[in-house]
Amino acid sequence: MDTAAGRDSVLEKWAIQLRKGSLDLAVLASLRDGPMYGLEILRRLAETAGLVVPEGTVYPLLSRLKSEGWVESSWLETGTGPARKYYRLTPAGRRHVAGMTQAWGEFAAGMERLLAPIGTSDR
Amino acid sequence: MTPSHASSRSAVDEYFSQLSQGLRGVPPSEADDFLRELRAHVDERLHAAGSGADPAEILRQLGSPKVLAASYRVEMAASLAARSRSPLQLLGSLLRWARLSAGGVVIFGVVATGYVIATSLFLAALMKPFRPGAGLWLIDEDTVSLRISPDSSHPGIVGARELLGWWIIPIGLVAGTAVVFATGALGRYGAALAGRPRWIRRRTLEQ
């Protein structure tokens, strides 16, 4: 398995797990500026964060975030196209994002300190 | 409508009929809402792409309907378990949830044990008329055994005393039913508690 392709696929799997683990935060954070619907969230993730996720994953995730009480949703008619299901943060959701953001910042800063020397010495 | 449009319609319809099948058992209002949301996604994508729209590609990016339905059930496992009506539904949702979290493993274990006990009580009660050895037996001073289907040629156990006799029938049925209800309530309560974090993780995170 120690071929370049093998290493790449292991790395790819790891990167997928990493993205999965942070998707809750990414989706909730993208709702901080106001209500959005699924496709809009997907675009926001891709454009702002470079997070390209399989499109199907975001909808079940939004359903769960709603059942957990972090977001609420409502259907809005668009006039021309199909109606859109908009999601917005609840007050509890807003507090949750703030807490997650802080935890993320601490975690990222710690990892940064740990990884910084590797970048210069191990390459 | 051009032929390619007609065939694309049916590809989308086929996708949604499979997705709808995959969501069987999910409360209809929620399943419908989820289907409608994804339908809106596909419609907007098709609309944005105009005449050059490739429905197959749009559907491919969404992932297979089977995977999408499974992923909905997994994400919603705790929530669905909390509202399940039948023991099978409850066990299925808890099993899916158990793959994700330690809390799910514990609740699944408790609920599965409860249902095994209830089933044993029912079986002992129902077998009693056919196998007289079925029932609750005191084997020795500190061993009580619930026997379901003992060898018919050997109805009793040497040195053992039967505790309930024919009373195992009404008592087994009533106790079994009580255990089923208690187990269901416990499982749903556990899932609701763990599946709605805002109830239990109420920290002051406001900055």
Image (cartoon, coloured by chain):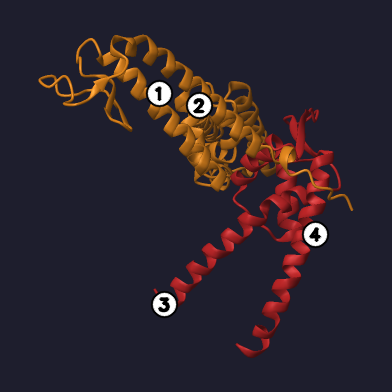
Element at badge 3? loop
User: Residue B24: x percent and y percent?
Assistant: 50, 26
Q: Amino acid at mark 2?
A: Thr
Mark 2 vs 1: CB contact within 8 A:
yes
What residue sits right under mark 2 in the picture? B183
Determine the colour of chain A: red
Element at badge 4? helix
Element at badge 2? helix
Name the side, left or right, on which B50 lies relative to B149.
right
Q: Nearer the viewer, mark 4 or mark 1?
A: 1
In front of the other: B54 or B99? B99
Q: Earlier in the sequence, mark 3 or mark 4?
A: 3
x 54%, y 33%: residue: B12
Q: Nearer the viewer, mark 4 or mark 2?
A: 2
Tags 2 and 3 both on a single chain: no
Tags 3 and 1 both on a single chain: no
User: Residue A40: x percent and y percent?
Assistant: 75, 45
Q: Is residue B118 visible?
A: yes
Q: What separation in Å lies between label 3 and label 4 (alpha carbons)?
A: 38 Å
Q: Which chain is orange?
A: B
Q: Amino acid at mark 3?
A: Asp
Q: Amino acid at mark 4?
A: Gln
What residue sits right under mark 1 in the picture? B118
Name the side, left or right, on which A95 lies relative to A46.
right
Q: What separation in Å lies between label 2 and label 3 (alpha carbons)?
A: 50 Å
Q: Nearer the viewer, mark 3 or mark 1?
A: 1
